[in-house]
Each structure stands twice: as C-alpha cells, then as structure tokens.
Image (tube, helix red, strand yellow):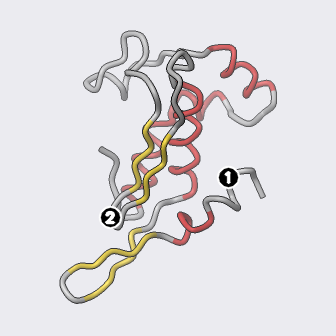
Amino acid sequence: MNALGKPLSKLWAGVTYKVGGRYEALRYPPVAIHEIITNAVLHRNYGIKDDIHINIYDNRIEVISPGKLPGHITVENILQERYARNPKIVRLLNKLRILRTRILAKAWTRRSEACAMHGSSLR
C-alpha cells in the first residue's frame, strides 16, 4: 500500500451527497486523487507559510495549494504547457521512482480522463 492509501481510503470509497430524497455516491478514482495531491506538493509555493488544504464536501473535493499558477502557466494553457516551480523536488521524486516522466507530462489529462470515466469532473 502506498503512503496515500490508508489516509485517503475513504476517498477511494466515495463521498455521498443528497439528490432529492436519496443519497448518491460520488466516486473519485485513486489515480486522480494521487495526481492532484502530488501536484499540490510539487508545484506549491514554499515561500508562503501555509499548508495544502484538502476540503471534502458532499459533492466535491477541493485541494488548495499555496500560491498562484507557476511561471507562464494559465488556466487557458494548463493542459498544453509544462513548468516545474520546484524542479529539485521533481527530480528527487523521479529518482525515488515515486513519479514517472509520463505521469508528470500527462498528469492533468490522466486526472480528467479518470474522473470522466467515473462520472465526476475537475474544474
């Protein structure tokens, strides 16, 4: 089991929310949660004295990482562009084989596809 498996096991099972008079399960694929949290750690601004916040609501999960989008990355180009705010951390994780190059290159796409397959979305 990886380090995220135990603390986030409830996310793997899903979150329920009320629709009309019944409860529905909103599920998050493990790869999507792993990628989102990994990117929050990799790309956060460590000059800001704050934590990464993970807020779990009935209908969504929010991961808030300190700082703005890095470098030249914008909401409009985030799917096409790459930029490492903390390249030493990226290299270290690659050396430790926690991340693979293709995960870094395709992280956003993989999260989006995984969520779409499970009926949830990223905004």
Residue 104 sits in which quadrant?
top right
In what quadrant of the picture does the N terminus appear? Answer: bottom right
For disc 2, the marked residue is 59
**What amino acid is labelled 2 in the image?**
Asn
Where does the image place residue 59, in percent across and percent down from the top left?
32, 64
Viewer-proximal residue among 11 and 77: 11
Q: Judge whether 3 appears above or below 42 on screen.
A: below
Q: Secondary structure at mark 2?
A: loop
First reached walking from the N terminus: tag 1 or tag 2: 1
For disc 1, the marked residue is 4
- Crowding at dot 1, Cα within 10 Å, few <14 / some 14-19 / many 20+, comes out as few
Q: Judge whether 101 appears above or below 19 on screen.
A: above
Residue displayed at 73% across by 26% down? 94
In what quadrant of the picture does the C terminus appear? Answer: top left
- Give left or right: position of 12 versus 122: right
Viewer-proximal residue among 115 and 26: 26
- Give left or right: position of 95 versus 81: right
Residue displayed at 63% across by 14% down? 87
Q: CA distance from mark 1 to mark 2?
A: 21 Å
Residue displayed at 41% across by 49% down? 113
Viewer-proximal residue among 113 and 17: 17
